[in-house]
Amino acid sequence: MGLWDRLKQHAGAQLLEVIDWTDDSRDTLVFRYPTFNQAITDQSKLVVREGQVCVFVSEGKLSEVFGPGTYALDTRNAPIMRFFQSIRYNLEEPYKGDIYFMNTRQFMDNGWGTATPVMIRDAEFGPVRIRAYGIYSYRITDPGNFLRQIVGTDGLFTTDEINGQLKRKLVSSMAQIVGSSQLAVLDLAANYQDLGDKLCDDLNPSFQESYGITLTDFTIQSISLPEEVEKALDERSKIGILGDLNAYTQLKSADAIEDAAKNPGVGGVGASMGVGFGLGNQIGSNMMQAQQQGAAAPAGGASPPPLPQQGSTYHYNGPTGQAQLPLDQVVQNVLADRSANHLVWQAGWPEWRKPADVAEIAQRLPPLPPAAERFHYNGPSGQGQKSAAEIAAEVAAHPDARHLVWQKGWESWKPAAEVPAIASAMSGGGDVPPPVP
């Protein structure tokens, strides 16, 4: 650039300015206002609109943050005199300043999702892998901190430059919150809002300190299970709706007939005939058996009622595995280990139940002694329900490990040594007298 061109630019830069910015994009977080040689004339007007803040950096230091309104800037660059001052510095302005406009509106509808499945432990299904996705919103709440920590001297800063970091933090925290919530996988859908609110509460202090932004919303749109687990749940739902394994077998036979009928080959016809004949024979056999039973029954209702069954049969899941067991065997399994996770189910129930919630089983279980207070425990030996004495033994066996406990009504897990009942058990219960002098 020639000397004459530079002189013309300097002449134009001596005039007072009206500094303002209107944003027609949807992704601009920060915009640095362009000024000649980063020199702002003293008493220039600054206009800040609603939804904006303006950060004034004077001579390399953050000077002031302006909210919505109109201001007169106080700088050291007086009109006309600034030109003569710049001559000493090869026509470079000695007193520089920067104006950064920042959008303080909410930046909404930012997507997040788990790139790979997240492993969690479920009380009913054991270890399972889940995927999740949703949207989140945020806004700048500490402009000075955002400029120092994130923007630096960038003249145009957009959402693409920070969204990747935010997504990684959000997904990591979401997996931690879901895993520590102790919610069953089947109950997660009913708690999407609570989980999202908890994540915002947990992350906002660190986001404000590290980035100068605040999460205004975190929405979980879906948490899904692996395809094979979803298929197993669909099969179980069919059994629960039908309420009868025989009816379920007949349904599968009918499905096989329909699939075979779609196959125009000879094999498909043969399969259709075979399944059809088998199902017809089964139906005919059932009808003949019903007729024989009707003919054998004496008229007038003189026949005695059927003998009572020896207790009900339940689908059982517990430490010994999953099986269909009579009532007495279920009671024996529960009494063998009262602290284990036992679940039972019968046709027609919407979900598995604990034995203590089934009247027929609960009346056969003796009550636990009052002193046997149970805690949810997590430590080197795994997770389960244990008494204070059992937890004290775990602490003694692994004194350097991390031992956490939780009970219903507590807000979070606690170290075992901070619980009075466990601390008493660790010290001998307070029943041991001091040594004889």
Image (cartoon, rainbow, N blue to C red):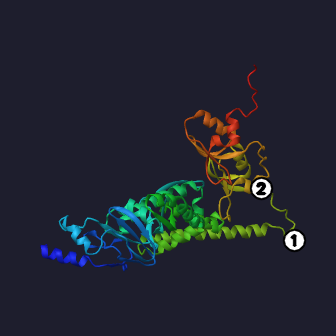
Residue depicted at 70% across the width and 37% down the height: 424
Q: Nearer the viewer, mark 2 or mark 1?
A: 2
Q: Residues within 10 Å of mark 1 (few under 14, many from 20)?
A: few
Type of amino acid at the residue the image marks with label 2: Glu
Type of amino acid at the residue the image marks with label 1: Gly
In the picture as drawn, the residue positioned furthest to the left comes out as: 2
Q: Is residue 129 visible?
A: no
Looking at marks 2 and 1 on the same chain, the residue that comes earlier in the sequence is marked by: 1
Q: Position of residue 330 (x, y in %)?
A: 70, 50
Label for residue 300?
1
- Looking at the picture, tell me which residue is in the foreground, 133 or 323: 133
Q: Is residue 401 above or below residue 367?
A: above
Q: Position of residue 341 (x, y in %)?
A: 65, 50
Residue assigned mark 2:
360
Q: Is residue 230 above or below residue 375?
A: below
- Looking at the picture, tell me which residue is in the foreground, 63 or 407: 63
Gap between marks 2 and 1, in whole Å? 34 Å
- In the picture, which quadrant includes the N terminus? bottom left
Q: Position of residue 104 (x, y in %)?
A: 45, 72
Q: Secondary structure at mark 1?
A: helix
Residue depicted at 53% across the width and 71% down the height: 255
Q: Position of residue 169 (x, y in %)?
A: 45, 59
Tally of numbered discs = 2
Name the quadrant containing residue 157: bottom left
| Residue 250 placement, left or right of 332 | left
Q: Secondary structure at mark 2?
A: helix
Name the quadrant containing residue 337: top right
- Looking at the picture, tell me which residue is in the foreground, 25 or 369: 25
- Looking at the picture, tell me which residue is in the foreground, 164 or 114: 164
- In the picture, which quadrant includes the C terminus? top right
Q: Is residue 281 visible?
A: yes
